[in-house]
Amino acid sequence: MKMVLGFSVCLLVLLTCLSGLVESATLHLDSCSVGVHTHELRKYYTAIRSNAVTGDTEIGVKLLNKKLIEGVQEGQTCCFLRLVLRMYVERVFSNYASSEPQQQRCSSALANAFVSIRRDTHKCHCHCAEDTQKTIDSVLAEFDKLEITQAAQKAVGELDTVLEWLEGLKRNTR
């Protein structure tokens, strides 16, 4: 009896500790919601951030800033997220490189997470307003002005802005 009780207590403590590791968040995107492990995104980004920021030589150029993201119109959150994810999946992560294997694994993990979130947002049937598309087009125009690897480096360095925005859209769930 004592052994079973002791095992049960240990199992309960273990599950409590692990539940913090698998915490996900529900992102509220206009008329639908998507589950995202924002803490994992942050963990992977933290591992590559320093390299991305120090390798960014285009100091005067800004692709995604807080004002731009905060200016997303009501009802356009889903669309804006889908377009940003598309940019990162199709243009940024495919052109971002690090000489360190650990950082390559982390950027791959981020890319895979973005692919997963993007897939989930396709279920939302987002409608994109012309202004939202124009905003992303202006970001892509700035991206295209830079050499591709430098543009990818800059976009990865600016991921913190995107992650902060995502964290603002969430409601924690377990």
Image (spheres, rainbow, N blue to C red):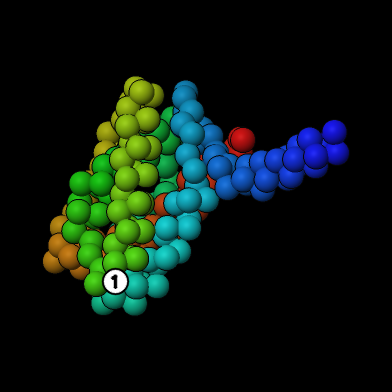
> At which x and y percent is residue 108?
30, 54
Q: Is the residue marked by circle 1 packed among few (<14), some (14-19), or many (20+) residues within 10 Å?
A: few
Q: Residue at x 55, y 39 (%)?
A: 25
> At which x and y percent is residue 165?
48, 49
How many numbered discs, if any? 1
Q: Quadrant of residue 103?
A: bottom left
Q: Quadrant of residue 173?
A: top right
Q: Quadrant of residue 161?
A: bottom left
Q: Quadrant of the N terminus?
A: top right
Residue 6 appears in the rendering: yes
Foreground of the two, 44 or 122: 44
Residue 65 appears in the rendering: no
Q: Residue at x 32, y 32 (%)?
A: 119
Q: Is residue 14 left or right of residue 64?
A: right
Question: Is 117 above or below relative to 101?
Answer: above
Question: Is 129 above or below relative to 162?
Answer: above
Question: Is 6 above or below relative to 158?
Answer: above
> At which x and y percent is residue 80?
36, 39
> At which x and y percent is residue 3?
80, 39
Q: Residue at x 14, y 66 (%)?
A: 147
Q: Is residue 69 left or right of residue 59?
A: right
Q: Is residue 28 left or right of residue 136?
A: right
Q: Quadrant of the C terminus?
A: top right
Q: Residue furthest right?
A: 2
Residue on which disc 1 sits = 100
Under tag 1, what secondary structure?
loop
Q: Residue at x 42, y 42 (%)?
A: 72
Q: Amino acid at mark 1?
A: Glu
Question: Is 109 above or below relative to 34?
Answer: below
